[in-house]
Amino acid sequence: MIGAVYVVAAMSDLYDTVERINRIFVSGMLLALGLTAVLGILLSGTITSPIKALTLQVTAVAEGRFDERVPILGNDEIGQLSSAFNEMTERLSEALSINEEENEKLSSILSNMNDGVLATDEIGRVIVANRRARMMLGQEAIEGMTLSECLAIDKAAIAGTLEGKESTRLISRAQDVSEEELVFRASLTPIRRRDKGVVGVIAVLHDVTEAEKLDNSRREFVANVSHELRTPLTTIKSYTEALDDGALAEPPLAERFVGVIRSETERMIRLVNDLLHLSRFDSKQAQLRRQMTDVGEMMEDVVDRFSLQLRQKAITVKVEVDPNLAKVWIDRDGIDQVLDNVVSNAIKYTLDGGSVRLTAGPTESGQLSIAVRDTGIGIPKKDLAHIFDRFYRVDKARSRNMGGTGLGLSIAREIVRANGGSILLDSEPGVGTIVTVTLPMVQEGSEYA
Ligand SMILES: Nc1ncnc2c1ncn2[C@@H]1O[C@H](COP(=O)(O)OP(=O)(O)OP(=O)(O)O)[C@@H](O)[C@H]1O
Ligand SMILES: [Mg+2]
């Protein structure tokens, strides 16, 4: 019995101990769990917050903001990733700004270029056009149009370029502002990409209006000179042949023929001299020899030189000089030549019994103005704009019969310009013509002297 009691007591002790041990285990486990949770939270925080910061930075870079940086919180893997990312951001920002700079340079070169530039995509639609191209084509909204539409050329040319062929063509276009035509050379070049082949066309438009004009006037000039020389040469040839064929045996006839040959030869010499004179002005080799000149006296001398012709045509002449006009410092020989031509025109193109009036005086702005008025046949309005052009004659046949080549007024204008002045011609058919020469009154030793 006693033994049983002992056993019971020993068992309850054992249960107590087991109970205590269990409690210690449970609380130890709870403590460990709690500690693990706290540690877990702390650890995850140190990993996620740099990753969050990195994510924010990636978003910022994606949106184009390169000024922010990820904080580097240690030397671990995340720290290294952050610093690598910062470095990448910096490089990217540098590369982008270099790219932007290049783009700006390119677009400023394009917009300041004197040539028009158009670029198209692979189907020939314009994607880039510079300012000059818009101006030359007279179109503001070019982008989106096809190149063949813009340049008004056939589609085949653009298609050819898209197949890789280069080509050049001259295009002329009427301008809105002036009546003059704009002529430009369009060079079409394919844009090639190494991996994709031809991806578009570049058209460069070069303005050649002036060059074309010059070329035309040169051609015209050569044609004019040849024509002017051919006429007397043909006459001389036929008269020489006539002399050869027996006219020599008839002295009165021979004399007349020789007279014609001489006058045609003189005409050619005059023409060649005029051309030489003009070429000296063109190459700026003409020299001014200024001298103190009494304008009244100079004008009387001119009239004297034409007295025979004036008398023959019964043309009355008057010279009026402003008494306030003092002696002037001018290129006497040059101005003499100008007046000779203007007065000879006035006499040539005035019918018998008409009158010619020469006047001279100072203008309001203190220049010397010399005017020659006639009561001649006049010049139609449409011809006035060309009257100073080389070889220009209103009535070619009439003028040539009078020995004119149409160079007189162009030489006169060159001389007056070389003297720093200007020459104007106004006329009314059937009423008369007035030619006004305005010259600066130069002081001895000044810039024009
Ligand atoms: N006073 C004028 N009245 C009418 N027509 C004129 C007058 N002056 C010039 N013209 C016209 O202008 C043209 C050009 O004149 P310009 O003096 O240059 O040549 P030209 O007299 O024919 O020849 P050149 O002077 O070389 O002998 C003339 O052919 C003529 O038709
Ligand atoms: Mg003349």
Image (spheres, grey):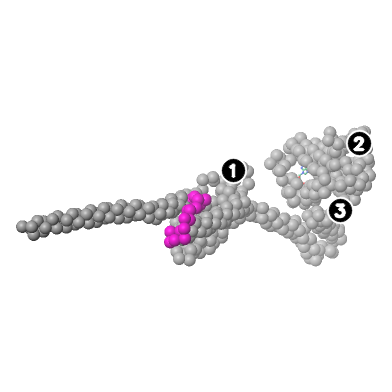
Residue underneath mark 1: 176
Residue underneath mark 3: 287
Q: Earlier in the sequence, mark 2 or mark 3?
A: 3
Nearer to me, 202 or 73: 73
Neighbours of disc 2 within 10 Å: few (<14), some (14-19), many (20+):
some
Can residue 72 be found in the magenta stretch?
A: yes
Q: Does ligand 1 reach within 8 Å of label 2's beta carbon?
A: no
Q: Earlier in the sequence, mark 1 or mark 2?
A: 1
Query: Percent from the top left, x then y, of residue 424?
Result: 78, 41
Name the residue rendered at 61%, 48% in the picture.
181
Q: Earlier in the sequence, mark 1 or mark 3?
A: 1
Amino acid type shown at disc 3: Gln
Amino acid type shown at disc 2: Leu
Q: Residue furthest left?
A: 1
Name the residue rendered at 92%, 33% in the picture.
324
Residue underneath mark 2: 325
Can residue 373 be found in the magenta stretch?
A: no
Mark 3 residue element: loop
Q: Main secondary structure of the magenta part?
A: loop
